[in-house]
Amino acid sequence: MSNKATEKDMELINKYSRRTLKEDEVYTFSVVLCDNDIDRDIEHFDDEALDTLKDLFVGVSAVYDHEPSAKNQIARIYSCGCEMPEGRLTAYNEPYKRLVGKAYIPVCGATEDLIALLDSGIMKEVSIGCAVAKCRCSICGEDMRTSACSHVKGRHYGGKMCCGVLSEPTDAYEWSFTAVPSQRSAGVTKSSVKKWRGAEDSMGEYIDALRKQAEEGRRYKSALRLETVKAGIMANVGIESKLLEKMTAELSVEELTQLKEAFVVKAQQRLPIGAQSRRGREKPEKKERFKEYEI
């Protein structure tokens, strides 16, 4: 950290002050806001998101513990950019990229304690509050909040861990000093609420979207269970339909999909598809192989 402001720093800082401040009236420091590595929420920003955030965070003020109150405002970012430390890789083996902001606070009696905490390294961890349009699944690419994506963050598929990829930021609210941030290198808090003002309405819309997604997921799983039971009957695995229904009741979408695929393979081996009958050849009598079951 350095509290020495350059002439260029002062030019940028004075865009936000009511009067022209001098170098000895401000304390400046750099802060890593977020990066593209996997955080404690098993999510990460993509590189394009960081490029967008570097513009959105210019002029944004800092608060304590994400409390959006004027009395909590303690610093302001006057410049922001992205850095790529040479040789550093993310957990998914891609070049590491981070968003770094330059911030200032006024030097006065009310900020002496804060400056001392910053210089001593006690006040260090930060977390950002922002909105992103999408949280894509790293496995299938679908939006994990609005689609029927069945992958689970933290689980491995084909040797690759599933995580949420945050993209297309729409707003930057604040950045906060926190004790336990989400990101290990800096800390980040994500929100789907688009604005602080009217947040209750936006959150209500978000909850409604989640409920709709949950209902669609239930319908999809119910249909998949029915298809799995049908495939099991056709495969003639020696299990009665009622028992198949009980077996599939507690399975996940991924488990149902795998079981259905196994039944289909077994059924195809048992009932191979014959060649199309020639004109005039007597067609075999149709037989009922299975019945519909409601689950």
Image (spheres, rainbow, N blue to C red):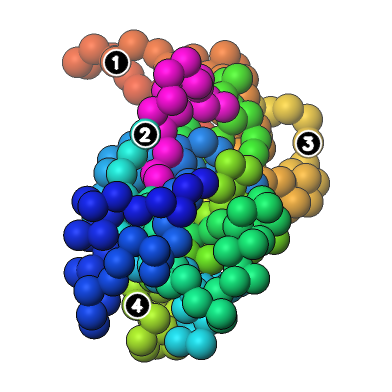
Left or right: 41, with 86 as reference point: right
Left or right: 137, with 259 as reference point: left
| Crowdedness near tag 3: few (<14), some (14–19) or many (≥20) residues, C-alpha within 10 Å | few
| Crowdedness near tag 4: few (<14), some (14–19) or many (≥20) residues, C-alpha within 10 Å | some
Residue 146, quarter of the rendered image: bottom left
Looking at the figure, which quarter contains the C terminus?
bottom right
Q: Which mark is residue 276?
A: 1
Identify the mark nearer the N-term, 1 or 4.
4
Amino acid at pointer 3: Ile
Single out the mark in the foreground, 2 or 3: 2
Identify the mark nearer the N-term, 4 or 3.
4
Instruction: Residue under label 2, please give it.
Output: 83
| Residue 275 x/y as whole percent | 34, 11
Magenta-tinted stretch: 84-100
Instruction: Residue under label 3, please give it.
Output: 239
The kind of secondary structure the magenta stretch mainly shows is: loop
Identify the mark nearer the N-term, 3 or 1.
3
Residue 257, quarter of the rendered image: top right
Which residue sits at x=46%, y=41%?
35
| Crowdedness near tag 1: few (<14), some (14–19) or many (≥20) residues, C-alpha within 10 Å | few
**Label 1 element class:** loop
Camera sees residue 58? no
